[in-house]
Image (spheres, grey):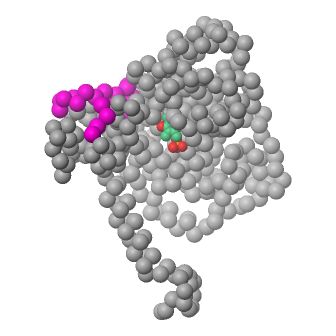
Amino acid sequence: MHAMKSGTSALGPPVLPPAERERLDELYTRLSSLKPGNIGYPCNQNFDYSELFRFLEFSANNVGDPFNATNYRLNTQDFEREVLADFARYTRAPENEWWGYVNNGGTEGNMYGLYVARELYPDGICYFSEDTHYSVAKILRLQHTRNIMLKSQPNGELDYDDLHETLRIHRDVPPIIFANIGTTMKGAVDDLAKIRAVLDDLAIPNYYIHADAALSGMILPFVDAPQAWDFADGADSIAISGHKFLGSPLPCGVALARKKNVDRIARSIEYVGALDTTIAGSRNAFTPLMLWYRLRVLGDAGLRKLVQDCLDTAEYAVQKLNAAGIASWRNANSVTVVFPRPPTAIMQKWIIAPKKDIGHLITMPHVTKECIDAFVSDFTAALAGKPLT
Ligand SMILES: *Cc1c(COP(=O)(O)O)cnc(C)c1O
């Protein structure tokens, strides 16, 4: 068949010109070659969603509130609700007193929590540590929320003394505490019990706590001794990424909040016949299906095993690096292994994200002990000034 011009064919549907098809093949090769060495970012590469590919035939859309029927009936909101119920269980949300939705990732979940907080306390001040994810300063700027950055401890955890001291000065303004449940660089958890002790000590009655559990929100529900981080421990909203620990080819996440707070911001929109409780209008119908599939394939027992394996690999990496003379450590219940900033060649080959004088690797399910061995041997070689293979 002779293409008439780019993108069209003489008969039938448009076809991709051969040269462009070659570019897709090159892209596939490039992504495939990068996949195994991706140890520096918290994105699980181990998943198989091929059973769901047929659902890409549909222009499905989960517009609006997942708990209210919408006019647009090509949706997966029944599956979305099941996903949310699982996450509510993992985060010990109060029964029938929670609300949530599947969104585009941790950032949107954080925005949601801070939005609810700001609607509750329009004059509130948001407190967050210097180890907080970079997106948070942007969100606070976007919604014009007053905010104060607090000091962190060397392990990346919030400095509770600085929190106490700073809150004491602003006791008349309701605090919105942005807690890191697994910081991006060091995997540190800001302990909600310690935060609430500070609030109690200062006799502050009105406050809001948002938990940014992008990565660790899928880890802490499955360990024996989690730090205080969830609804039962005092969180008012929680954000968790779906593409991080669970793994997904499309960014996604979950936002959960106390229902009574969400009810205050809900508005009904006639055009879509939906309750406008979400930040995005049109919403992905495919990512809730993927999350549902992952949760059903793994089950709670499978998740617990996956988490334990990842923690074991993280401990293996700490031991192995230290044995090679590279000072490394990790926080409790964390799969983030911290070490001195590696030479540039190492960061490029292993896709390592540096910050100032440190680097880290994250033992997601696709990161094997063999992978750690190869990394440590490269790291040692580079420090000795030898070229990488
Ligand atoms: C990754 C991350 C985010 C942002 O999540 P996205 O899903 O990338 O939007 C927020 N907070 C922390 C602690 C993170 O690690």
Residue 73 seen from this side: yes
- Magenta segment's dominant SS is loop
Residue 321 painted magenta: no
Residue 228 coordinates in the image, percent (x, y): 50, 22
Q: Is residue 126 left or right of residue 23?
A: right
Residue at the (31%, 59%) spot, across then down: 33
Residue 82 seen from this side: no
Image label count? 0
Residue 22 vertical position relative to residue 77 in the rendered view, above or below: below
Image quadrant of residue 136? top right
Q: Nearer the viewer, residue 27 or 47?
A: 27
Residue at the (50%, 65%) spot, across then down: 53
Q: Is residue 84 left or right of residue 24?
A: right
Q: Is residue 2 left or right of residue 338?
A: right
Residue at the (56%, 15%) spot, across then down: 163
Residue 338 coordinates in the image, percent (x, y): 33, 31
Image quadrant of residue 304? top left
User: What's drawn in magenta, residue-wise?
Assistant: 322-343
Q: Nearer the viewer, residue 92 or 343?
A: 343
Residue 125 vertical position relative to residue 109 in the rendered view, above or below: above
Residue 102 coordinates in the image, percent (x, y): 60, 46
